[in-house]
Image (tube, rainbow, N blue to C red):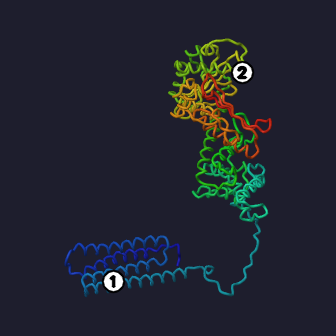
Amino acid sequence: MNETSKPLWKFVFLIADSVLSAGLAAASFIASTNFTGDKRKYALIAASCFIVCLIISLISIIRYKNERKGVISLCLGLQLFVLILAFTAAKFLNGFSLSAMIVWAVGVIFEGAIIAGYVIQQKKLDEAEYESETPQDKPSEPEEPVIEIRQPDIPQVPLKQVTYAKKDVLYAGRENDLMFDYDKVKDKVTEEYCLANDKNREALGDYDDMKIRNYACTPVSYLFMWAARNGHLSERLLECIDTKPLLADDAEPAAFIREKLKCQVSSRDFADDIQGFLEDYYRSGSTVSGDSGRKFENDYYIQIRNPWKVYYCIDYTPDIYKKVEEKIEQAFRNYKITVEWDASGLMDETDSDEKRYSETFEQELVICKAPGLYNDYFDKCVTQACNMPDSLVKKLSDKLKRFLQNSEMTVKFSGDGRSFINKLHSGRLIIPPPHGGDTAYVLLFEADFIMEDSVCIVIRENEVISICPSADAKSPWEYENELRYSIIQSLKLTNVKDVDSLGKALRSYSDGSVEQTVIVPEFTGAPVPDENRLFVPLPVAELKNRNDIIAEKMLSDGSADRYECVPVYSDGSFIPTDLNMALYKGAQKVFSSKVSVW
């Protein structure tokens, strides 16, 4: 039978059989009753028989459309079964009925006629199709002649060769730019594994080797899975490797890297638009002032910190991933803001035609704004910068005076902070793109009485966030300025200069305005006497705790051998103005962090 044909007669048989069978089913029941009792019950059963037959017909029609084999016979058999059920139900309710038996017999004869008609018609159709077949289509005889195939005289146009990338076959060249390689860490991971499991290297088997490779891949697997789930993997890698397993709730990213990436991760596996982020966040290995350098490593270790101080031999868990993912997202946001600031050109010394007179600084300010700013946001920033409230002018005066006192000044003069404001000239108002609902802007002034020649002032929501040389200027939304803003917000209920005794410091701690911690942590081996107490705002305490965890790891793995934390106090306050932390390896400083508190 030709499978592609859809003869109309089959469909007509199907519809006719469906409707008539449904009617016969209902008639079989009605004929068997004397209509005694509640007639609604009989009507309901009759309607049910009719509906069941129609449903069977619908299913058969769908099957006829999709399959076309054995549909009619299946439909007939099912509907015959419904007839029998109807007759049985009638007999059960009303006893034997000759009229119902006659209707049932008619139904059986009718169904038999339908089946016979279907078979005869199908046989005719098959014979007609067979006769219409060409000799080449008919079954070949056993003595099939040998056919000689000759090459054509005219050469054919060669087909275009299409090469498809094979799944799980890595592309060549990626190993030239590895950011993680098992061979570089296997000794350290093996040592951790042996200590954690009380084994020696000679006793390790295949299962141990698999676990060690998994553990070695675990730290980088968090970053790799974040990239996979956020669309930051390279197209070339995605052509070779199926990363869908990383999107599942029960993902095992370390095993994925071990099996699919051969325990290696290359920077080429990531998209081009995050190469700078990887360089800054994952691959940064040198220590710089104010940062430990190994940013991702520190974020990861802080989340898996454990009594054994192991770094690798910690099993992957979704809970740890969520915490590490949050840190990666924060770092990525900060990276994008930094790139945005550097690429904006707002700090470039280019003149602008737009100027506004500032009553606060008694001079015209050149306006430099990021493109695409809303007019209401722009006007709000300009209004605040040109007409600062007295409270903000006071904060600016105090911080500017302190900044200048710590700077090398070419001309010495005395006076309050306001006198320093009056010495600033050639001012520019810089309005970067906003990030959130707060208003923030940067003021840049020439200051020929200091060595740096220019001063950069960052303002956010009527708070002086930062004062620094223009060369050190950063976006108001960059991490360090975010931290400074958090510190200012946490100190709003505390007059730090009034906290001039231990009792007042303890009261500030009890009411939650400051946090109590220690200057030198216990892991250094130093005692914790009363004079080791440190009272700082909560954001500073959290930052110090983070840095202490990093310091503990560096001291335990031999990256450093000496810890130092020096708070700087002023005006008799028990809350330090600055907090300086450092780690040393011999005479070399390998880590440093300075936090300005107030």
Residue 35 appears left or right of 227? left
Q: Which disc number belongs to residue 452?
A: 2
Q: Could you say whether the residue bearing mark 1 is in a helix, strand or loop? A: helix
Tell which tag, 2 or 1, sits nearer the viewer. 2
The part of the image, by quadrant, that contains residue 243 is: bottom right
Answer above or below: position of 428 versus 127: above
Answer above or below: position of 5 versus 478: below
Instruction: Residue under label 1, please give it.
Output: 107
Q: Would you call the spot at circle 2 few (<14 residues within 10 Å), some (14-19), or many (20 or more)?
A: some
Q: Would you call the spot at circle 1 few (<14 residues within 10 Å), some (14-19), or many (20 or more)?
A: many
Q: Could you say whether the residue bearing mark 2 is in a helix, strand or loop? A: loop
* Amino acid type for the residue under numbered disc 2: Glu
Residue 407: x and y, percent? Answer: 70, 21
Query: Which of the two discs, 2 and 1, labels the residue nearer the N terminus?
Result: 1
In this orientation, which residue lies closer to the viewer: 564 or 582?
Answer: 564
Residue at figure coordinates x 69%, y 56% from the top left: 215
User: Does any portion of residue 408 appear in the rendered image?
Assistant: yes
